[in-house]
Amino acid sequence: MIDFRTDAPVAGSLDVRWHAGGPVAGNDTAPAIQVHAYSEHTLILRQSKSVHFEAPFLYLLFGNDRALLLDTGATADPTAMPLRATVDTLIGQWLARHPREWYGLVVAHTHGHGDHIAGDAQFADRPCTDVVGPSLDAVTAYFGFEQWPLRPVELDLGGRVLDLLPGPGHEEAAVVFHDRHTGLLLTGDSLYPGRLYVRDTPAFTATVDRLLAFCERAPVTHVLGCHIEMTRTPDKDYPRGTTHQPDEPPLELTPAHVRRLRDALARGRGPCGDFIVVYEDGRRP
């Protein structure tokens, strides 16, 4: 059994060059899914921009009893996006190093938009697997949320515990995942280096307030979202649909960016250097 309990978060590596697509659409020789080992028990996957311009990031976290796959990408076709095969291989490699008689998988989501749930069907018949539906009812029922969106819950993968924070505002059933083992705060589309689409400003503002309070009481090493859409030039993003982003900034943000986001919401600002707030509901806090 692996002891995931630590006095301080276990450091991992973000020394990675994410493949940012090719200059000609469909002429990208990168694999459909890029895999980076943040640590032995924490993997970050990125869907190729040649497969889908959204190029979302997915997360695979291993516990003693089961793994968590967070999001399933933007493409349903397993030929173009072999997510099930890739995850099965990665779990098999982990189990070869850490044998178990039984090992489960939870497939869940940061939120229910199409570019984060398209691969769900690939796992429908996988043994020992729970696929959590993306609706608010499915999310609250599976994880046991009570008084949504006020109270967080815990998810135990077998000694590896995650804090699940309600995160509506971009999407009504959005959830932010905090991994106590690494200190990673996985924010989905609520915060990342790109365009933050706010569809319910009061709910989004309340989510950011909860994240700020959480960051003050829990160790957060990196803030990792699900996309990169910015360039390295402050306030300049790549247009939607871009399939080649040679000047991408790093994926990782910091707790200070949560504060910056809250300040931006208070001022009703759009561009904020490392991200851009887009008010789709036409409201300001």
Image: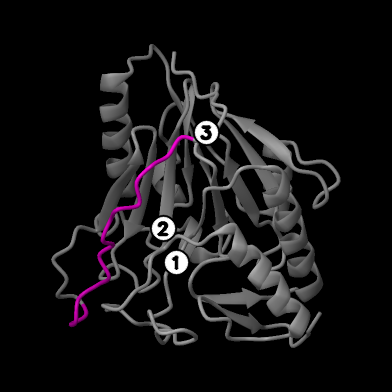
Q: Say left or right for 243 vs 161.
A: left
**Residue 187 forms part of the magenta stretch:** no
- Amino acid type indicated by mark 2: Phe
Task: Using the image as rendered, state which of residue 135 and residue 63 is in the foreground.
Answer: 63
- Amino acid type indicated by mark 3: His
Determine which residue is flagged by label 2: 57
Which is closer to the viewer, label 2 or label 3?
3
Pinpoint residue 234: horizontal percent, then vertical percent.
46, 84
> For the residue labelled by badge 2, is the local secondary structure a helix, a strand or a loop?
strand
Question: Which quadrant is home to the C terminus?
Answer: bottom right
| Distance CA(mark 2)–CA(mark 3) | 20 Å
Task: Using the image as rendered, state which of residue 58 and residue 285 is in the foreground.
Answer: 285
| Distance CA(mark 3)–CA(mark 1) | 23 Å
Q: Residue at x 48, y 18 (%)?
A: 3
Determine which residue is flagged by label 1: 227
Check residue 181 in the rendering and tell me which mark sits there, or answer none. Answer: 3
Q: Are marks 3 and 1 in contact (CB under 8 Å)?
A: no
Q: Are marks 2 and 1 in contact (CB under 8 Å)?
A: yes
Q: Earlier in the sequence, mark 2 or mark 1?
A: 2
Q: Within 10 Å of the Cα at label 2, are there few (<14), some (14-19), or many (20+) other Cα atoms?
A: many
Give the magenta part as a residue range. 10-25
Check residue 88 in the rendering and tell me which mark sits there, or answer none. Answer: none
| Distance CA(mark 2)–CA(mark 1) | 6 Å
Magenta highlight: main SS: loop
Which is closer to the viewer, label 3 or label 1?
3
Pinpoint residue 167: horizontal percent, then vertical percent.
69, 57
> For the residue labelled by badge 3, is the local secondary structure a helix, a strand or a loop?
loop
Task: Using the image as rendered, state which of residue 92 and residue 265 is in the foreground.
Answer: 265
Q: Earlier in the sequence, mark 3 or mark 1?
A: 3
Q: Is residue 145 above or below residue 40?
A: below
Question: Which quadrant is home to the N terminus?
Answer: top left
